Amino acid sequence: MKKILVIQQKMIGDVLVSSILCKNLRLSFPDAQIDYLIYESTLPVVEGSTSISNFILFTEKERKNKIALLKFACRIRKTKYDIVIDAYSKLESLLIVLFSGASKKISFNKKFRNLFYTDLITRHSNYSSNLGLIIEQRLALLEPLRVEKKITFPSITVSASEKTFASALFEENAIDTHKKTIMISVLGSDKTKTYPLHYMASIIDDLAANFDVNLLFNYSPNQQEEAKKVYDLCTTSTQQKIYFKVIGNSIREFIAIMNQCDLIIGNDGGATNMAKALQKPSFILFCPWIDKKGWALLEDGRNHVSLHLEEFLPEVFLNKSAKEVKKNYSFYYEKFEPKLVIPSLSSFLKNHVDNPS
């Protein structure tokens, strides 16, 4: 039996995207052992996948302790994998690949990587479809195996019990399911990825004034204070449409709730990637220092729309590196005014909400 290991040690969006490697491999090698090595914290987004034989979980201990990392790599070696696909391609995964003993080792072409891998893929920098550059690059890792790329976008499995949980939660909070329910990703993973709170409130006010919808906020428990600031900045009439306390206490609960919603808008991040994997329309605001070309997944101008300040004010980005922009993120964000966002958002909503106020 062929044994294949796919490595993707990064965050939720990356783990979701690279899961399509496992799905395509399963179609080509139905009897193979296909294992997926990921960070322990990202397991919930791929739980239930029938394409994956085993999840190999990389913990904080292995990340922070070199001896623990060495022991982890030795455990990997015992499995005797035939093929390793390293989508992470960092020093952290390099040791694991070296110890794997696999005869075929595939990764991206970087300096000195030819010393450790048998097959190297050059990352292209331009789209050839609307899948998004990140997905196109990941799919390219299958080329040395001549695997047909039938699955081109990730999906998330939602169990019957999770659907029941979300339905009951909506009923308990008297959320009118005859109206569209919009999840708003009000905060990014950190302040450099978060659209200014007063701007976000303005956008939500405009949305609430023009569409008769239910509004949920996506935020983690440790972000509640910041999320409450957005809520407090909204008008009283807008607040009446916001179900502020309806949030998930885990990634799986968020997935269940998002599955019950109709669409998502807000900051780019794990929440928007999960929503797309649930086949929900999305309207995304990219932070100034991120090149949206990589993560503008399924961009089609209707079901999936994203905006970046550079599309409106390209001159402020001239001769500026991503590092420089990130350092001065607040300067760029202040220029990303709601008046630049609202026209496109309104058009998007008119395509997906059938009950304007």
Image: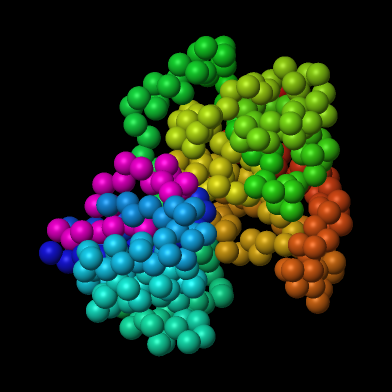
Name the residue at 80% across, 26% down.
Answer: 232
Name the residue at 27% across, 68% down.
Answer: 77
Between residues 21 and 220, which one lies in front from this camera angle?
A: 220
- Give the extent of the magenta segment: 31-53
Between residues 97 and 53, which one lies in front from this camera angle?
A: 97
Between residues 135 and 92, which one lies in front from this camera angle?
A: 92
- Report the number of numbered marks: 0
Is 47 inside the magenta-drawn segment? Answer: yes
Picture quadrant where residue 141 is located: bottom left
Name the residue at 83% across, 29% down.
Answer: 233
Looking at the image, can residue 309 be seen?
yes
Q: In this view, does 139 lie above or below 282?
A: below
Apparent side of residue 17 relative to residue 302 in the rendered image (left or right): left
Name the residue at 50% across, 13% down.
Answer: 171
Picture quadrant where residue 33 is located: bottom left
On-image quarter of the N terminus: bottom left
The single residue placed furthest to the front in the displayed view is 67
Picture quadrant where residue 355 is located: top right
